[in-house]
Amino acid sequence: MSSGATTHLPVKLDGLRVALTGAAGGIGRVMADGFKACGASVYISDVDETALIESGHAGQIADAGSAAAMEGFVDAAVAHLGGLDVLVNNAGIAGPTKRVEDVTPEELDATLQIDLAAMFHTARRAVPAMRAGGGGLIVNLSSAAGRFGFPLRSPYAAAKWGVIGFTKTLAIELGPQGIRVNAILPGLVDGPRIRAVLKAKADAAGIGENAQIDRAIATTSLRCFVTQHDISNMALYLASPFGRTMSGQSLAIDGDLQVLI
Ligand SMILES: NC(=O)c1ccc[n+]([C@@H]2O[C@H](COP(=O)([O-])OP(=O)(O)OC[C@H]3O[C@@H](n4cnc5c(N)ncnc54)[C@H](O)[C@@H]3O)[C@@H](O)[C@H]2O)c1
């Protein structure tokens, strides 16, 4: 199996106006860079001011846990970009790793707000702007945890399954107005975070790090991790003319993951 993509899909998105949440780092940052590289104009939100400045993208601090901040972010994006063609709801947190009886109401609330409710708040403001422009695209980041159960991560899994219901419903609601809505479900995305998680699991199990990595990739048919670019490139494809009939889809980018452990 060859390693995953590390370059942006070469599609032309000149003039496309794109707003992305949580895009100063991680997958969102690669997406923002990708849209810009393809010719789009980009406006991003994040909670990390240093990363936001360092990204070089236009944008603002806006916490996905706040309805008012999310509405304000979209309004600012529409004003800055002169309209809106694409909204990427990317901001997300892992939430607690605990048995359900140990999850506090505050932890549950924060996870559901940031990972699910924020998408309602951005859509509420983005849809009228897209409709005014004759159509658009909304891309919602779900997860493999939006198609499998995920032991000890019940708030995250509940939110990410909720994202699928929201996506499929909006696609039907907005399709006649030329607005497409899709969810992307990343699997095991390679990077420092997953490597640290796997090292901690290896230490806990008393096995080597490489054995733990082999164990993780054995949960995929293609025996691979995916890259941030693999995820980003699906968003670029959806936003390009090639994606024009894609809506209401749950797009797993995960090497055919079979289980979450
Ligand atoms: N990385 C993975 O393995 C993976 C797998 C499946 C799904 N996902 C999903 O993809 C999306 C991006 O994941 P990632 O791994 O790039 O995330 P990340 O942890 O790297 O964070 C991305 C960005 O979001 C910002 N952010 C955090 N909390 C925020 C908030 N409350 N409001 C606004 N911004 C906030 C962070 O500062 C960071 O810049 C998330 O929705 C995540 O659930 C990721």
Image (tube, rainbow, N blue to C red):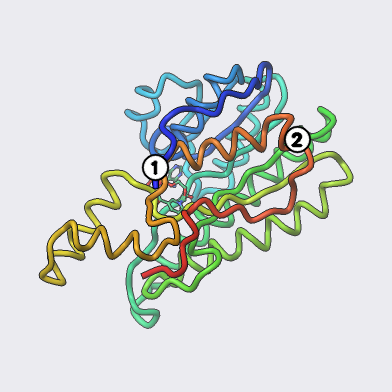
Label placed on residue 2: 1
On the rendered structure, is 4 left or right of 201? right
In the figure, 133 relative to 198: above or below? Answer: above
Residue 210's image quarter? bottom left
Reading the image, the residue beneath label 2 is 136
x and y, in percent, of residue 174 in the image:
82, 47
On the rendered structure, is 34 left or right of 88? left
Label placed on residue 87: none
Image quarter where the C terminus lies is bottom left
Measure the C-alpha gap from mark 2 to mark 1: 34 Å
| 53 and 62: which is toward the camera | 53
Q: How many neighbours does mark 2 have within 10 angstroms: few (below 14), some (14-19), or many (20 or more)?
A: many
Helix, strand or loop at label 1? It is loop
| 73 and 246: which is toward the camera | 246
- Give the number of the mark in front: 2 or 1: 1
Amino acid type at circle 1 is Ser
| 70 and 206: which is toward the camera | 206
Query: Contact, CB < 8 Å: mark 2 with mark 1?
Result: no
Helix, strand or loop at label 2? It is strand
Amino acid type at circle 2 is Gly
x and y, in percent, of residue 146 in the image:
54, 63
Q: Earlier in the sequence, mark 2 or mark 1?
A: 1
- Residue appearing at x 20%, y 65% in the figure: 201
In the figure, 112 relative to 59: above or below? Answer: below
